[in-house]
Image (tube, grey):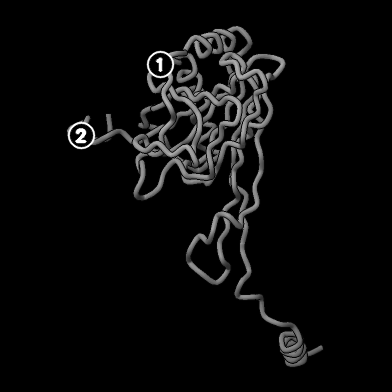
Amino acid sequence: MTTQDTAAAREAVAQQCPPVSTEAIWRVPVTVCRITRFLGERTAGALLERAIASTGELLRPSLIGDRELAPEVRRSRSYQDFAAPELIAAVEEVREAVEHTLGVSCQYAEPSYGLNVHNDGDFYRAHQDSSAEYSPRRLLTFVYYLHRTPRPFTGGELRVFDAALPLYAATTGDWERHTWRDWEPEHDSIVFFRPTAWHEVRPVGCPSGRHEDSRFAVNGWLCVPDPADRGGDVNP
């Protein structure tokens, strides 16, 4: 077959086949790094007991954007001053590997974190941890899970939505049309992902309603240092 014949054949095929639909959606799975048995039985157990001991006035209704109470969007309790230095040290140990996997640099980032407690009926609707308007200094999200064994609650999965991009547009599209993957809130496991990813906490069922039977999670971020704290210089 000559070059001319080949070109003619391709043109004939192109005329027979319809073009790709202008409504086509390009879907890309969001990368999540998950590490199990992260701190080990003894350290995880001590951290769980510390979380269980966080009761009463220490726990406040969780807010949206750290300022708005919206129980139709988010229902849980939070303790922003929860101390978990052993967890932050472990996060630093795996930071470079996580950076490589997620394609993000957090070399000079500073941690920010708190305890979140979900009990019967609690949830957090789909949201982002960072955007151009909200908390743009956040570079990396991490969530570390704690609970009694056997697991005294159901649900509470972390649902991470795949990125969806209209094939013929430069916008991200509507996240509600995305596919997703659910990640189990397994005791002593941690997940890392980019804070711009859409994600949610699935509703929790906890028949006993007891605080100690809750789904405990240390939610945190590695953030660009605030220039105001360094005189405008983000480097050490």
At horizontal 67% and vertical 31% (from top left) the residue drawn is: 155
Q: Closest to the observer: 100 or 205?
A: 205
How far from the left and from the top, in percent, is residue 171?
48, 63
**Pick the front one: 50 or 22:** 50
* Image quadrant occupied by the N terminus: bottom right
Q: Quadrant location of residue 137? A: top left
**Residue 24 lies in what quarter of the image?**
bottom right
Q: Position of residue 164 (x, y in %)?
A: 58, 58
Label disc, if present, on residue 58 of the rendered structure: 1
- Residue 198 sits above or below residue 62 on the image: below
The kind of secondary structure element at disc 2 is: helix
Q: Amino acid at mark 2?
A: Ala
The residue carrying pointer 2 sits among few (fewer than 14), some (14 to 19) or many (20 or more) residues within 10 Å by Cα, namely: few
Q: Residues within 10 Å of mark 1 (few under 14, many from 20)?
A: few
Q: CA distance from mark 2 to mark 1?
A: 29 Å
Question: Residue 9: percent from the left, percent from the top?
Answer: 77, 88
Query: Circle 2 is placed at which residue position?
Result: 228
144, 66: nearer the viewer: 66
